Every structure is written in C-alpha cells, then in structure tokens.
Image (cartoon, rainbow, N blue to C red):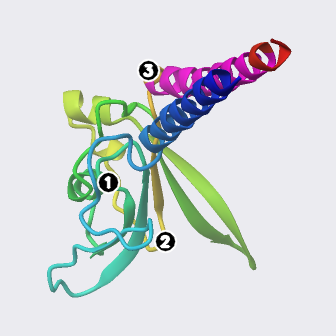
Amino acid sequence: MIRNTMFLACLLFLSVHVFAQGQSMMLGNGGTGASLTNTGGSSYYDMSLGAGLTIPVNLWGYVKNPGRYVVSSSTTLVQLLSYGGGPNELARITDVKIVRDKKVDSTVKQVVILCNLEQFQSTGDVSQNPMLYPGDTIIVPGNAVSSLQSTLGIVRDVALALQVIATIILITKK
C-alpha cells in the first residue's frame, strides 16, 4: 500500500510538472524570447526618438515583441512591425489587421483594414503598407501550424488529466 501511494505521489508530481511546462510554452509571445521591457506581463515601448508628434498604437499577435508603442505620427505598418522585432515564424502576414476607431456622426465605429504584407514585399504595393493613426491596434494572426500547436496542446493536457484519473482509479481498486 505504501508503495502504491509513493508511486501515485510521484506520478501526480510529474504530471503537474509536465502540465505546467505545456502552459508556460503557450503563454508569452510564442516562445520566441522575452520582450524588451516587461512589467507585470505588459510591454510598453517609446519609439518616437524625440520626434515631434507621436501616436500610441498597439501591436498584438505573432510578433517577437508585442505591446503598446509610442511612435512618430508618420509611422507605417511595416515600420511598426520592424520596431516589434518583425513577425515570428508562426505569423501569417497575408492577413494582418489594423483595427481603427472611426467617428461616424456622433458614434465611434471600429473599422478593420486588411493588409497583405506578402503582396507588399513582392510588388511594393504601398496600399498594403498604410500609415498608422492614434489608437490603431495591429493584429498579426498565426498560421495553420500555430493553430495546430494550440489544438495539440489542449489535447495533450486533456489526455494527461485523463491518464492521471485512470491511474488513480486503477490504484485505488487494488
């Protein structure tokens, strides 16, 4: 009985440790390294370099350094992505979104602008590299591999929990 209890305790310890490792890999910025500045999980960057007029923008998603940036008012999408360390290896740069607040009459509506940065790279089409406005939020989505990784992580965690439950049931029945 003591041997079974020790085995169960070791198995539980290892299971929790593996589960925690899986969770830490899914957090952060895709496992690509730490942010330049990190205070309590949020990042703030001032890229204005003493420029005159500056604007705040948000950079989210599959970039190396997501966070809130203060940039020159003449900053373009590609420049902001460069400030953020560029898209990481799991980014889908064909569907980058800019979420912008637009005032219509007396209400504020959000407008989503889709940009294809592969098209910008191959053709130089400047319409795919717009200027940013105050409060813009840029979202760089993940590709199919990132979705698969997230799904497999969830399946792994559920399977691990089921394995622990099955082991407990088997040990307690003896």
Q: Can residue 104 be found in the magenta stretch?
A: no
Q: Is residue 11 left or right of residue 168?
A: left
Q: What is the x, y in percent for residue 133?
A: 42, 69
Which residue, given by chain and number where applicable, does mark 2 sit on?
135
User: Which class describes the residues within 10 Å of circle 2: few (<14), some (14-19), or many (20+)?
Assistant: some
Which mark is in front, 3 or 2? 3
Q: In the image, is residue 56 above or below residue 9?
A: below
Q: What is the CA distance from the residue labelled 3 to the residue labelled 1? A: 24 Å
Q: Residue at x 40, y 75 (%)?
A: 56
Identify the residue at horizontal 21%, vertical 27% (top origin): 122
* Residue 117 percent across, percent down from the top left: 32, 36
Answer whether labels 3 and 2 touch (C-beta < 8 Å). no
Using a 10 Å C-alpha cutoff, classify the residue at mark 1 as few (fewer than 14 neighbours), some (14 to 19) or many (20 or more).
Answer: many
Specify few, some or many for label 3: CA neighbours under 10 Å numbering under 14, 14-19, or 20 or more.
few
Instruction: Give the residues in magenta.
Output: 146-169
Which numbered dot is residue 154?
none
Give the mark, 3 or 1, whose residue is nearer the N terminus.
1
Q: What residue is drawn where x is 54% and y is 62%? A: 100
- How far apart marks 1 and 2 lie (CA) works out to 13 Å
The percent coordinates of residue 116 (x first, y second) are: 38, 35
Where, quadrant-wise, is the N terminus in this rendering?
top right
Q: What type is the residue that disc 3 sits on?
A: Val
